[in-house]
Structure formats: structure tokens, C-alpha cells
Image (cartoon, rainbow, N blue to C red):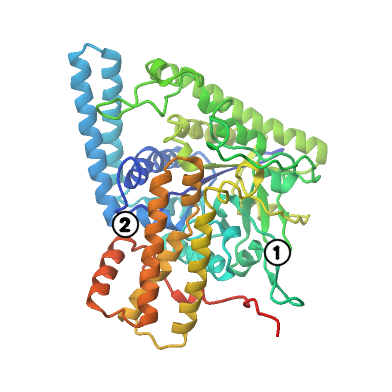
Amino acid sequence: MKNPLGNFCFVLHSHLPYIKKAGVWPFGEEWLLEGMLETYLPLLDVLEQLRDEKIPYKIVVGITPILAEQLADDYFKKRFEEFVSDKIRRSNFDIEKFTNRHQNDYRHLAELYKHSFEKILDSFRNRYNRNIVAAFRKLQDEGYVEIITSAATHGYLPLLSRDSSVYAQLKIGIDIHKKHFGKKPKGIWLPECAYRPEKFVQITKNESYRKPAIDEFLAGEGLEYFIVDSRAISGGAAFSGWKRNGVYGDIKSPVIDYSKKTGKTTMLPYLTKSGVAAFGRNFETGLQVWSGEMGYPADGNYREFHKKDCDSGLQYWKITSTKIDLGLKEIYNPGNVSSRINENSDHFNWLVESTLSVFSKDSGNEGIVVAPYDTELLGHWWFEGIEWLRQVLIKISQNPNVELTTLSEYLKNHPPEYVAEIPESSWGDGGGHYVWLNSQTNWLWTYIHDAEVQMEDIAGIFSRKEILPDSDEARALKQASRELLLLQSSDWPFLITTKQANEYATERFILHYNRFCRIVLALKDNTVSNGEFLEFLKLTEEIDGAFSDIDFRKFSRREPEKRSEQ
């Protein structure tokens, strides 16, 4: 029987933007296919293996609604089988190439890849019946995994101008979650951990309107908790996250003084005024995995992500050093990796225990270390990360001083005693919004805000009409709603700011805006039954067809308009 010093919870946030029929490589569908191959399926294998080995683990896994929709889409199931079959073909090509060159070490790696690809494809077809979402749901129903939700398309909520959009992003996200996982979520990963406190907006010179805090929307939907960045709880400098090359191109981080401490700790959750609890991510454990310079993934023995074979695209090199050019990388040696993973997982287990021990000694409380990471960091970016996660779950489950838990379970056993006012914040550099709102992305928000108002107008007009479910008007209203949600995805400004896929994100954003405007114009002009428009609508539905039961009425106006003085 454990008598723990405190609790620990992994929170894995799984998200990719909507990419169906929107490019393949280097940007587009391959993002999801790689995520399935390198992260989601290996993660499922590990979680099921631990269950079968009777390891009493607990973990929180967030799956965004837009990701769940894509994973459940038969189109992507077929594309995945094609994708992995091509990977097997590429590994066979490399095996023959390296055999002819007498490069036995490279040939051995190619053989390992082939075996891994074949195993994952077999698991996808036969173990999981081509249904990743159902496999996670089964682990949820068995009590091992707590699955949380997010906003529908990962919209950056604090920068949306209309509360109708905030509500729709959250409400539709929760509805989609229930559709896929069979129950209402208890928690939510706010996109980019971005939070907005209550605000007051002037309507006239003497009147103002109160915009509710984000947590009030969550309370209205019965959610119990959300997660924020460390700084939003404890103050101090915000953690910069995963990147190796300083500022984002010519976009500088604003100079903001976050040195003032709040006296609060991320070792405890805090209630907001609405009654929803806020957990802060633990800085020390976060640094060990997120840092591309000093964290575990920077170990020179681990596989280098960025260098790929010019023929097959497979990765045969190790990091060697984070400070050398790709051309100087040495060959990856799997034999040198096991001891490093074991050492890193031992260190993490020790770090969690020591962190809880210090807090218990200082406060007398049984705290919690919350360790949130992007799921795709494990397996995809950090090749060895899935095995590291497996070892950590085993070691912490066997540690008498640490209790593995889910966040809702912790809240049930340790109801929060303190209230905190969460400041406007995110996980981004500087702790504010600049990664998503800056000189490179200002123009996106002008278009988003315009579309939000147009959608409210359309929702107002057609909510007063009788709309037949299968009518052209109903189809157009649904598609306008989808396009607005897709337009609001936080991925587009993020990809522009970070220069990861600037042109692609810009093109996608403009495409969704143009589709939205064309649909709204047809609705206003009563031309939705025009033959040319119906052809456009059919094609658009085939591409941007997520959220099949979406209700445009969720975008109805929720706040008064500014009025001129009389």
C-alpha cells in the first residue's frame, strides 16, 4: 500500500490542423500520416502493453476534436495504409542500396525500419481494426486513460473578437468529443494554453459590456478543469518551449517584466471564480522534455530528426551534437540508446519524487506534478520518447512515494482550497499572445474578426427561418460554420510566425476565408440553389467535411453591439 508524498500526472496534448486533401508533402496530409505512424499507434501499443502487464498506470490524453474527426475518417485510414506501404517499399529500396554498397550498419537500420513499419501496419489493421479513436476510447473505458477535449479547431480563444465564436469553438468541440468517446469530457486543453480573464468593452460613452472569462464558458458546459502555463499560476519568466534557434526570424519577443512572483505554486490546482480548477504545468519537469538544448531529447545518442536520406527520406543519423551541421552527424546506433533512455527515465522519476518531497516538507500538503507535452513530441520529434514514456510510467507506478493519477481523480481526492485570478496568458514566448499576434499575423485577425461578425449576421437571419434539414440553405449554413472554424485555427498564425510553413499557412487561411465569403454571399443573395454554386458547395463539402452535424445557430450573437451616441 502506497503512502505517497504526492501525485504525478502526464498530460499529452494531441493536435494537428485540418489537412484533408490540402497538400501532401512537405506540408499537408503527411503531418497526420506521420503522427499516426510515429506517435499515435506506438503510444497505443505502449499503453496496451502496460495494461496487459498489469501496470497500474494513469495518464491524461487530450485529443482535439479536429484531430479525432480526421483519425475517424475512412479517407485517412486508406491514406495511412498507402503511406505505410510506401514506407516499407522505401526501406526495401534502402536495404538493397546499402547491401550493394556494403554499408552493413545502414542496412541493419533499414531492416529495423522495415520490421517496425510492418508491425505498425499489422497493428493498425488487426489489433485496432483501423480505428485509433476507438482504441483510445477502450483504454478510457477501462480506466487507464482520461481523455480530454479542446476547442473544435484549436482556435486561439483570447484573440477571437466575438463571444459567439468562443462559445461555438468550445461547444462544438465538446459535442464532437462526446460523439467519438461516448462521454462528456471532464477537462479541456485550452488551445495554446491561452486564457482570457473577464473584460469590459465600451458600448457607448457611458455604457460597457462585460465579456466573461474563458473559464465561465467552461463552467457553463460542466467542465472541471483546464491547464495553464507555469507563469499564469506562479509568476516569473515564461518558459520558451521547444526551439533551438532563438527568436522567430525577425519577430522579436516583447520585453515584459514577469519577475514578480505571485506566491502561488503549480504544485496545487486553484479554483477560478466560476468554480473550474486551473492546473499549472510544472516548470522543472517540463524543461527536461521541452528543451531542445538541455533536455533529454538533446542527447547526442538519440536519433536526429532533421537529417534524412536523399533517396528514401528515412533517418539514419544521431544528433551527435546540437551545435554541429547536419553534414557532420554520425550514424545512429540503437545499441547505445537503451542505457540513455533508462538513465533519463530514472532521472525523471527521481525529479518527480524530489519535487514532491520538497513541497510536502515545506507545505505539509500532498501536491501534484503536472507534466503536459505535445503528444507528437514523443515518437515523431523525439524518436525515443515513446519508450521513455513507457519506462517512466513503470518506474513511477512502482515508486512508493509517488501516486500516478489523472487530473479529475486528483480534484476528487484533493478538492482545491484556494482561489486564483488567472491573468491573460499562453504557453508562448513571453507568456502572452505575440506568437499568434504580431506584425506578421495582424492581417489574419482582421479577416477572422470580419468573418465572425458576418457569421453572427447570417445566424441571426436564418435562425428566424424554417430551414429544412437537407435543403441547400441548410448545407450552405453548415459549410459556412465549418469554414469559419477552420479559419480560426491557431495553427495558421503559429506556422507563419515560426516560419515552419509560412506560405502554406497563408494559402490555407486565404482559401478558407474565400470559401466562407462565397457561401455567405450566396446565402445573403438567395442563390444557394444556383447550379454553379451547388457544384462549388459539393466540392467544398468533400474537402472540408468535418463536423457533419454542426449547427450554425451556435454562432448566434451573445453580446450587444457598440452604439453611437444619440
**Residue 149 on image: x %, y %:** 51, 57
Res 150 seen here: no
Please name the residue that numbered disc 2 is placed on.
73
Which quadrant would the N terminus be assigned to in this image? top right
Q: Is mark 2 on a helix, strand or loop?
A: loop
Give the residue number, with chain letter if any, for mark 1.
Answer: 198
Q: For residue 293, which quarter of the picture?
A: top right
Above or below, 304 against 489 in this view is above
In the displayed structure, would residue 385 be above or below residue 343?
below
Nearer to us: label 2 or label 1: 1
Q: What residue type is labelled 1?
A: Glu
Classify 10 Å Cα crowding around label 2: few (below 14), some (14-19), many (20 and above): some
**Residue at 60% across, 62% down:** 223
Q: Distance between the residues labelled 2 and 1?
A: 38 Å
Q: How many marks?
A: 2
- Decide if residue 289 is on the left or right side of residue 476: right
Residue lying farthest top? Answer: 102
Image spot of residue 260 (x, y percent): 80, 42
Q: Nearer the viewer, residue 129 or 302?
A: 302
Q: Can residue 444 be seen here?
A: yes
The reply to whether callout 2 and callout 1 are in contact (CB within 8 Å) is: no
